[in-house]
Amino acid sequence: MVQVEVSVDSGEAFDRALARFKKMCGKAGIVTEIKKRSFYEKPSEKRRRIEMKRQRKVKPRRMGDRPQYHHNNSGSGGGSSH
């Protein structure tokens, strides 16, 4: 559990302190954790989500995935002889 503390100066506006608090919560990952825990996730769904995330991160390159470039190697240098 992460604890976020914000000290407020005597002359500081409430809006500024609230903005700092929200920023610190975002950096600590509290907002993400709350959203993740707002609904129950079955263990099988959690495993599937983690596996999909891992596959997106790794994503192996295959020969068919690259765009095909066709070059005219006629040697004329002028244009296409089609």
Image (tube, rainbow, N blue to C red):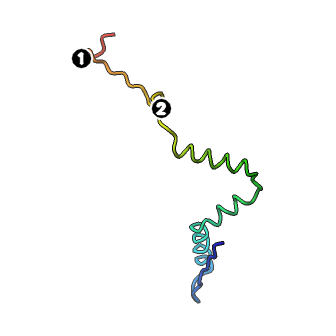
Residue under numbered circle 2: 62
> Taking 23 as reference, is 68 left or right?
left
Spatial distance from mark 1 to mark 2, Cα to Cα? 34 Å
Residue farthest to the top, as pictured: 82
Disc 1 vs disc 2: which is toward the camera? 2
Please indicate whether residue 44 sits to the left or right of residue 4 in the image.
right
Does residue 78 lie above or below 52 as drawn? above
Task: Using the rendered view, name the quadrant where residue 72 is placed.
Answer: top left
Which numbered disc covers residue 78? Answer: 1
| Structural crowding at the residue carrying mark 2, measured as other residues with C-alpha within 10 Å and reported as few (<14), some (14–19) or many (≥20) | few
Camera-nearest residue between 29 and 53: 53
Residue 29 vs 73, above or below: the answer is below
Circle 2 SS class: loop
**Relative image position of residue 37 (x, y in whole percent):** 73, 60
- The quarter holding residue 29 reads bottom right
Q: Badge 1: few (under 14), some or many (20 or more) residues near its Cα, within 10 Å?
A: few
Amino acid type of the residue that numbered disc 2 sits on in the rendered structure: Arg
The foreground one among 32 and 42 is: 42
Q: Residue at x 62, y 46 (%)?
A: 51
Q: Earlier in the sequence, mark 1 or mark 2?
A: 2
- Where is residue 25 drawn, in percent x and y? 61, 70
Where residue 69 is drawn, which disc sits there?
none
Residue 40 on image: x %, y %: 77, 55
Q: Amino acid at mark 1?
A: Gly
